[in-house]
Amino acid sequence: MYKLLTHNDLDGVGCGILAKLAFGEQVKVRYNSISSLNREIEYFLENDEPNTFLFVTDLTPNEDNEKRLNDFYNAKGQVQLIDHHKSALHFNDYEWGYISVEDHDGKLTSATSLLYDYLIKNKQLEPTAAITEFVELVRQYDTWEWEKNGNQRAHSLNSLFYLISIEEFEEKMLERLQANDHFNFDEFEKKILHMEEDKINRYIRRKKREIVQAKVGEQLAGIVYAETYHSELGNELGKEYPHLDYIAIVIMGGKRISLRTIYDHIDVSEIAGQFGGGGHQKASGCILTEEAYKLFVLDTFHLSSIPEDAKRNQYNLKQSSFGSFYKNRNNDTFILYSKNGEDWILEKDKVAIEQTFTSFDEGERYLKRNYAAALVRDDLFVDYLMSEVKKRENS
Ligand SMILES: [Mn+2]
């Protein structure tokens, strides 16, 4: 017999589907949240029948269970941990641990792609084109490579996963992968997936208007409350507000925080680690501990949301050497302009600040990080110019 304990997201369930393709009735699969994994491991070690081979995929056991699993292995128990999270790399010290963040070609891995390779290598699963295509969609979604590649099908697969129950998804995929030469969505799925994309886009637009910014430790975080669509939100908000180091998505109902960054030089698994969580460099999570609650919720609750840059302007434009006009929620006004085409000057309420900038982007980043200001709409810009002219006429 086999038992698989795996994550309850698309990548984790991808592992469950592969295990069922490989072992059929011989495997029991349990899908877990990060926090329920350790209970399940303890339950297995205390209750499950001997001669059961345990797989753990896409999740990291805690320190106590790391020891327990190693004792179990040394007592001739059979266990294999397969994961792609950087925070689990130390499990490679064990014979039963296989952690790989990148494959030999430098491509990012997912738990599903690692388990697929493992099952093929051990001759437990015969590879087919349909399964290979499915595994690649899961990998591209989980590593966010789909976005770079414009692979909408990978995103759709994840959307479908959240539209139906895990059981239904598992059943549909098992049937599809066994019966077809290639992996495809059916017509009905295509239709609801299209509706779902629209819904996600509307949700993201709303969250763009709700996000606040605050210094947390050394970094500037964007903080937003959201129960769903965390990956999409983290990415879209990160790109909309590139002056933020990372996005913290607070899930009040679940008492958790999801952290995302679009940058290579920020490691959100480290930030999550400060609150007992973990994950990847660009995507991680932690429990909303008392300390995290204070920093991310209590200390920021009074803040106004970040104003959005005007997007349909014809006159007040970015990069204009004549000057771009900004305002924040305190009604402080800012003009960012270039004196000689080289140095960029920032004026706050008509007084130039001491620091100068070598590019528009550098100046705007400073302005947004320190003053949370946004490019104002043309009509407000024109009002401002008119009032300036009047003041001059009157003086
Ligand atoms: Mn994963």
Image (tube, rainbow, N blue to C red):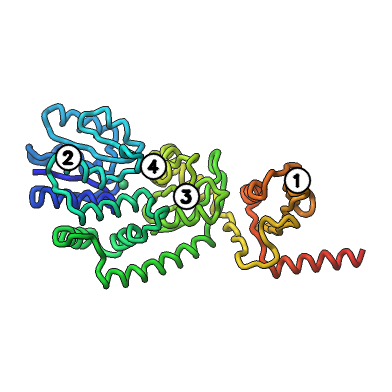
Q: How far apart in space, not on screen, are marks 3 and 1 (Cα)?
A: 31 Å
**What residue appears at the point 27 percent right and 72 percent down from the top-left corner?**
188
Counting labels gives 4
| Foreground disc of the pair 1, 2 | 2
Query: Disc number at residue 248?
Result: 3
Amino acid at pointer 4? His
Q: Do the CB atoms of the residues marked 1 and 2 lie less than 8 Å apart? A: no
Q: Which mark is residue 353?
A: 1
Asked if residue 114 lies left or right of residue 195, the reply is left
Can the viewer see residue 230?
no
Task: Name the mark on residue 280.
Answer: 4
Q: Which of the two labelled residues, at mark 3 and mark 4, occupies the earlier sequence position?
A: 3
Disc 2 packing (10 Å; few <14; some 14–19; many ≥20): few
- Evaluate if marks 3 and 1 touch, with contact meaning CB atoms under 8 Å apart: no
Residue closest to the eye, 41 or 197: 197
| Mark positioned earlier in the residue sequence (1 or 2) | 2
The residue shown at (55%, 38%) is 218
Sequence-wise first label, 2 or 3: 2
In this view, the residue in front, 321 or 238, is: 321
Classify mark 4: helix, strand or loop: loop
Q: Nearer the viewer, mark 3 or mark 4?
A: 4
Residue 189 in picture, x, y percent from top left: 28, 69
Q: Quadrant of the C terminus?
A: bottom right
